[in-house]
């Protein structure tokens, strides 16, 4: 560069200035030729480059100034061609700006805009050494056609209860501690050892390996969740104010108000809890109960308490709620994440191609619309729905379109 400047009899500074102006003119010409005439020039960044170059040249000898300015030219060119961020892009067009603005305004629909899902979970804790009560509760659940999550205390599992649970295949076996410990006072190593031992005991006696862990006394911590994660669990309950590492399901209501003597919550209060849940934005309602509290004086089943439980389960079913176990809830959430939602010409498309199971959903009506229709393309005629419509079942491998009127 120095030799070229001397050959034409101009100073180094003037030569580099000519190069800079030429580079700028070439960039402007490129924009015009490519029909992107509405040009935006980043004067702030250009001024910054000039200041940096001037500051460096001030401390350098004259022979080095040409090289400094040459770097300045390279910065100009690189800023135009390969800038990664807008604030270092020297020249851009308004066409591109408008495109980015439109792209930023595009709203990508989510599942919650089209439908909602709601589940009820019945969680029976402290299962292990009161087979009479466990059998009574499971009989009620079977009559109602619902599944229950059974929190088994491995160290308390007697032969009668083990035999009962071996045949209760529709229900979920969960690990409820080892001998019903407070986990929040134990080290990670102690928790890991207890969960590992309890899991192995359940697997050996009942022939199933649990995937849900229920910390006794709601005493789970981050260490509890980490130990469960390392031992192959995918669901934990009631871990509060800690990273859970797993699906963490918080309980909604206790079925009992007292354990000594056993006393159950008023049935009207339990029903109002379901009503409030239906009006809320929550996805799952978990009722925690302990089957041994249905045992009355003399060790016999209190039929009045058992009848109230039947009525409660019946009320849940009458509200259209799907009763699932905690394990099933985990699987449903995982499968729901495989649903793709898109929007085209004002209609929502629901793609269940990658789902493995069906899902009962509540279709949502858009604000200001009177009703909507949903149609499984190439499989059925449009089905009309409104705010009072019952749940709609999405089947796997289908493409649905939802329109609003």
Image (cartoon, rainbow, N blue to C red):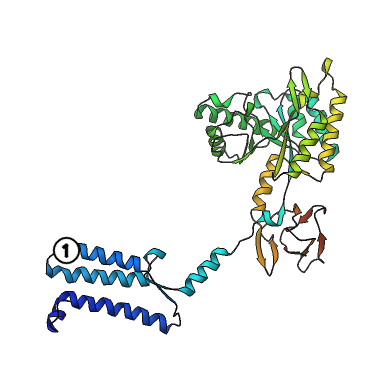
Of residue 109 and residue 17, the one placed in the foreground of this image is 17
Q: Quadrant of the N terminus?
A: bottom left
Q: Quadrant of residue 297?
A: top right
The image shows residue 184 at horizontal and vertical percentages of 55, 26
Estimate the x, y position of residue 375 in percent, counting from the top left: 78, 64
Read off the residue under disc 1: 58
Determine which quarter of the picture holds residue 19. Answer: bottom left
* Figure check: 184 above or below 74: above
Q: Residues within 10 Å of mark 1 (few under 14, many from 20)?
A: few
Image point (14%, 80%), residue name = 10
Residue drawn at the location 54% of the way across and 31% of the way down: 192
Q: Is residue 163 visible?
A: yes
Against 323, is 70 above or below? below
Q: In the displayed structure, would residue 255 be above or below residue 376?
A: above
Quadrant where the image shows the C terminus: bottom right
Task: Name which residue lies at 81% across and 57% down.
Answer: 386
Badge 1 marks a residue whose secondary structure is helix
Q: Residue 211 in the image: state x and y as whole percent.
A: 64, 39
Quadrant of residue 57 within the rendered picture: bottom left
């Amino acid at each position: 560069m120095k030799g070229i400047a001397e050959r034409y009899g101009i100073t180094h500074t003037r030569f580099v200035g000519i190069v800079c102006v030429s580079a700028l003119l070439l960039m402007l010409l490129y924009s015009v030729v490519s029909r992107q005439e509405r040009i935006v020039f980043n004067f702030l960044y250009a001024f910054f480059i000039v200041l940096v170059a001037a500051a460096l040249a001030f401390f350098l000898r004259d022979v080095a100034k040409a090289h400094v300015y040459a770097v300045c030219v390279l910065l100009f060119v690189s800023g135009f061609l390969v800038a990664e961020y807008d604030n270092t892009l020297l020249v851009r067009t308004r066409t591109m700006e408008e495109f980015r603005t439109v792209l930023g305004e595009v709203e990508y629909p989510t599942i919650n805009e089209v439908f909602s899902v709601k589940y009820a979970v019945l969680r029976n804790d402290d299962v292990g050494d009161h087979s009479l009560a466990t059998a009574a509760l499971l009989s009620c659940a079977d009559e109602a056609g619902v599944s229950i999550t059974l929190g088994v205390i491995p160290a308390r599992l007697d032969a009668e209860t083990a035999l009962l649970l071996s045949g209760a295949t529709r229900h979920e076996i969960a690990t409820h501690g080892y001998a019903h410990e407070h986990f929040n006072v134990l080290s990670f190593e102690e928790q890991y050892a207890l969960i590992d031992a309890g899991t192995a005991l359940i697997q050996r006696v009942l022939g199933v390996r649990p995937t849900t862990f229920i910390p006794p006394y709601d005493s789970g911590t981050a260490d509890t969740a980490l130990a469960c994660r390392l031992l192959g669990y995918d669901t934990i309950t009631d871990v509060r104010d800690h990273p859970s590492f797993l699906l963490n399901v918080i309980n909604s209501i206790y079925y009992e108000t007292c354990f000594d003597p056993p006393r159950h919550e008023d049935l009207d209060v339990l029903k109002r809890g379901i009503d409030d849940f239906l009006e809320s934005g929550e996805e799952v309602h978990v009722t925690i109960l302990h089957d041994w509290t249905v045992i009355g004086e003399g060790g016999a089943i209190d039929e009045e308490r058992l009848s109230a439980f039947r009525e409660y389960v019946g009320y849940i079913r009458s509200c259209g709620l799907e009763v699932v176990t905690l394990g099933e809830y985990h699987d449903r959430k995982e499968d729901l994440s495989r649903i793709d939602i898109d929007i085209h010409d004002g209609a929502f498309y629901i793609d269940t191609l990658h789902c493995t199971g069906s899902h009962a959903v509540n279709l949502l009506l858009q604000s200001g619309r009177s009703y909507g229709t949903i149609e499984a393309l190439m499989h059925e005629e449009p089905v009309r729905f409104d705010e009072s419509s019952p749940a709609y079942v999405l089947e796997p491998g289908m493409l649905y379109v939802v329109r609003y009127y």
